Amino acid sequence: MKPLVGIIMGSDSDLDIMRGAADVLKQFSVPFELTVVSAHRTPARLVQYAQTARERGLRVIIAGAGGAAHLPGMTASMTTLPVIGVPIKSSNSIDGWDSVLSILQMPNGVPVATVALNGSKNAGLLAAQILGATDDELAAKFELFKHEMREAVQEKIDALKD
Amino acid sequence: MKPLVGIIMGSDSDLDIMRGAADVLKQFSVPFELTVVSAHRTPARLVQYAQTARERGLRVIIAGAGGAAHLPGMTASMTTLPVIGVPIKSSNSIDGWDSVLSILQMPNGVPVATVALNGSKNAGLLAAQILGATDDELAAKFELFKHEMREAVQEKIDALKD
Amino acid sequence: MKPLVGIIMGSDSDLDIMRGAADVLKQFSVPFELTVVSAHRTPARLVQYAQTARERGLRVIIAGAGGAAHLPGMTASMTTLPVIGVPIKSSNSIDGWDSVLSILQMPNGVPVATVALNGSKNAGLLAAQILGATDDELAAKFELFKHEMREAVQEKIDALKD
Amino acid sequence: MKPLVGIIMGSDSDLDIMRGAADVLKQFSVPFELTVVSAHRTPARLVQYAQTARERGLRVIIAGAGGAAHLPGMTASMTTLPVIGVPIKSSNSIDGWDSVLSILQMPNGVPVATVALNGSKNAGLLAAQILGATDDELAAKFELFKHEMREAVQEKIDALKD
Amino acid sequence: MKPLVGIIMGSDSDLDIMRGAADVLKQFSVPFELTVVSAHRTPARLVQYAQTARERGLRVIIAGAGGAAHLPGMTASMTTLPVIGVPIKSSNSIDGWDSVLSILQMPNGVPVATVALNGSKNAGLLAAQILGATDDELAAKFELFKHEMREAVQEKIDALKD
Amino acid sequence: MKPLVGIIMGSDSDLDIMRGAADVLKQFSVPFELTVVSAHRTPARLVQYAQTARERGLRVIIAGAGGAAHLPGMTASMTTLPVIGVPIKSSNSIDGWDSVLSILQMPNGVPVATVALNGSKNAGLLAAQILGATDDELAAKFELFKHEMREAVQEKIDALKD
Amino acid sequence: MKPLVGIIMGSDSDLDIMRGAADVLKQFSVPFELTVVSAHRTPARLVQYAQTARERGLRVIIAGAGGAAHLPGMTASMTTLPVIGVPIKSSNSIDGWDSVLSILQMPNGVPVATVALNGSKNAGLLAAQILGATDDELAAKFELFKHEMREAVQEKIDALKD
Amino acid sequence: MKPLVGIIMGSDSDLDIMRGAADVLKQFSVPFELTVVSAHRTPARLVQYAQTARERGLRVIIAGAGGAAHLPGMTASMTTLPVIGVPIKSSNSIDGWDSVLSILQMPNGVPVATVALNGSKNAGLLAAQILGATDDELAAKFELFKHEMREAVQEKIDALKD
């Protein structure tokens, strides 16, 4: 199946975190692709990836990066697709603040849908919600996911009682 | 036309900022509704708003709030729709940090698509992009919007030369 | 005995921290209940818990949460009881700042009595002080507790001398 | 009537902020006293105030201070009454961070119920809630207050519709 | 004369700040060009500007931007020239922290020579120093500039004495 | 010999850090005393210690504390002696910021000479410098100490060459 | 009279703040000198000032600076006198944090007695306390100063009662 | 060969980090020297090093330091050469913020080209770029370096596909 979501990250050292987004999309049976695109080391690849994303069938892009994290914002500058940014607390980051601020604080005209620091699972869920906004089947799966979260909490509540 | 986007805010004092989202949606001819829902002062209204949002036809919710900003995250907890959060530097905020962190740092399972501090225009644009992910006409409008941004920059470049 | 204090937390991973409040209340012989209520994963449970708290006999609620911590503030929005908030430095928190700010910076009208990061022991003590404001027996116990703290410091002073 | 709540502040320059607590207590008909106690300039007065507070009939103390704000914590060290701390963004404060942290981050054994920066109104409300924990009449007034907040929001919602 | 230094900025609203770099270069008789290049609104222009900078004769690039400031880092990713980054406290910035961190915290392999917040004068001076590293005449001018700074301080010292 | 410097700390858990001050004073043959004085758990002891410090012969007080660190400032409020504050990154501190700000940001009228986070060695040195301001023998020892520091650096420089 | 305290500042724009130290010393009849020494623009003057300070009769140095504030620390590196650092929130400072951290966080071996941001009055008082450590007349004046502070607070307390 | 780049650091404990700059310069065959110069413990050596740097043939200075990091800025105050500052997260640093701010926030007139926290590799690369601004052979090596970075990313991309 053709991927609907593109998961990209600035470095393969971000893979441990970004796999969280992939896992969620598998769980929701949303086809995706996952690769490395470095804004700073492979800028031409970034341009090519972002500019062709929509025509290749992608509907949402998830971009994770750490430190001075330019990948999500630069991707957003070159596509009309919604871009979800995942700030990563990488080894070169000052407690994550640089990653968060350089993804979140985009200027007017070029939004990035930022999730929590290292929040790649939520990035996957948000991608599912975005696709589910106009896809009732996916929305139903999300409803079920919410139900399962509630159940999981309930089990812990019951365990606490014992 | 039935609204596709719901714009809510924690207080009418947030209106000056949040109008930015409404203006963008008007520009893109995306029907929307705009109202006040206070997580802390009208929690029952929040529950009702969030739980009925999808069935009332909304596809995206934009929620703006300041200080300990719980409106976006609590809305997200009660709907399967994507929720865009706008941190607002309200008068009771510590330079905006509280607004940003209490919207951005959502736990796994309940994402909020956070935009920049006071970034309501970008919230409107992101809503348009989310709808445009599966709506080619809207995507084309977004492409045009990007073109116009480039033109506007070019005019300023030309003005600088003179 | 009917619980006078309700201790709730957003996740069972907060239990290690929140047990501190329970231990203190046991020490003061204040009856309490302890459970998990997730603002984001079990919002209906949160509404039910908060709205029935007073009629079920609770006099104080202690709520602990990490990251974008909405549990204390949302609980406070739905009860007239005093709510004590414990910011928790959970694994998804940015050094605790998000937890602190999203609990502390409540808007006018809905206070949360916030204690230090991970300060669940102090939350238990504050609950005892609140009940002790109008309960002389409990106040006397608190006076004794203060006396014992002084003694404990004195022992360390004496040990240092040796 | 004998005051039940003591409102103290580190400097008369804090009066503009701290009046908010007094106004709330008047509204709830809770008798209070209001004065200046400087931890740093009048330490003997601080000791005397804190140590005699309970025997003078006070049930709650509200203490506001800015910068290196030691008044709330030192008061708490010398009374068994619950102490509510109001961090004030005074002229000598670094954006309020010093006030917040030096009130909030109390060590185990001596809690201060901290409210938002400049949140004196919430301090007043919290004092009313603490007294109302065991006073049904006051709790009923608080319920009414919450009702009025909801009404006020509703009026703004209606105004927005026009 | 062919420009040796390229001064670029993300928006014409940055011009007031960035003129400081131009003024310094005029003072040192270093030929320069100044224009707007928006990383987010004109990404193609950014690619073109950065990739042709060296062949067009530039020796140093000064790039100023605010908020999620990607211009300096992305320029650096596409040229071998040294790039000086000027973080700007623009209207959409959180006290300048986002600008500073998104310029400074570049990953290994792609440095940006970052100067102080709004430090465009120092950016101009640094460009002069970089060119002066291998240009004795320029170095002599810089020595003179340092001498004049000392003199200016001395005048103020003398004025203080009177 | 009668102690000239009093080293106090809020908790015996601060001893590992505060021993640094004692070691320095030993090295300079400055007689000192070292004990625990908790502002929050033993406020009466604090009053007694601070008020009698000068008459007991102390010339300088070094006070270390963590979190909401009130010991240095409250000591300063009750003595005319210079008080050196050592912010400690204790286990209950938010990365040291609370300790630093609650010691440094004292209001006009009551200074605390604050040193770096965990900087107890420098507190000891500063005490020696204060006494040395009017004691030429001690000043000569300090000059020697500076000489030895230079030598130690030189040895490392030489080692690097090999 | 020969000055005992040297007040220096990095720029004459710091004069408005630093006059506070001079005013205090006048009040205590402590002879002082006041001048500009720029660590960055007049480094040779800094070396000369610091190295000759003690032999010229100074007993304490007060150094104020903003931004990357190196004046206090560098002065301390070249004298055995105690150096008091005043972080200044100058126009080029990021809310004062740079000034505070670059003065406070000195390495082991070279302490700077740091006071609050813009706290020049406290710097003057601390200088008086340092001199007063071994000067009973000055200590008596300081005791009187403390008494007057208490009186001033009492007057405000009385005014509040009316 | 005579060194073109001087690498200095405040302490030999910074050596592990600063070796990164040396490694890069070796890779680019740029001759360099590396030593310890402590601004605070060996100020005379600092003056001597900085003032003679240009005449000894250096073209760029790389200075690394942690905490209240005065070495880069003070070096810059005494040479006309471009100075690259490397903030180091040393053991006495508050999460690196002090190092970053005390190097970055230099006043007008004395720039320091600041790189990321612990970014010594980028300091080495920036030195190579500065020399390469007027040295085509070095620029060609830098182009090759950029090519190799791209290749390295491509290999990781390929590895991910398998």
Image: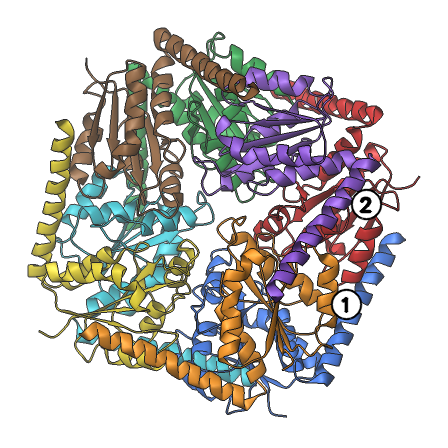
Chain colours: A green, B brown, C cyan, D yellow, E purple, F blue, G orange, H red
Relative horizontal placement of residue D149, taking residue D87 as reference (left or right): left
In percent of width and height, residue F57 lies at 55, 90
Relative horizontal placement of residue E143, taking residue B66 as reference (left or right): right
In front of the other: C101 or D68: D68
Find numbered disc 1 in the image and state the secondary structure of the residue it sits on: helix
Callout 1: few (<14), some (14-19), or many (20+) C-alpha neighbours within 10 Å? Answer: some
Callout 2: few (<14), some (14-19), or many (20+) C-alpha neighbours within 10 Å? Answer: many
Determine which residue is flagged by label 1. Answer: F149
Relative horizontal placement of residue A89, taking residue B144 as reference (left or right): right
Place residue E104 in its image quadrant: top right
Instruction: Look at the image and tell me in which quarter the N terminus of chain B lies.
Output: top left
In front of the other: H60 or G92: G92
Instruction: Give, as a three-letter code, the residue at label 2.
Output: Gly
Name the subunit of mark 2: H
Above or below, comparing residue B89 to residue F85 in the picture: above
Q: Residue at x 51, y 86 (%)?
A: G139
Q: Identify the disc placed on residue H6.
A: 2
Find numbered disc 2 in the image and state the secondary structure of the residue it sits on: strand
Above or below, comparing residue B83 to residue F106 in the picture: above
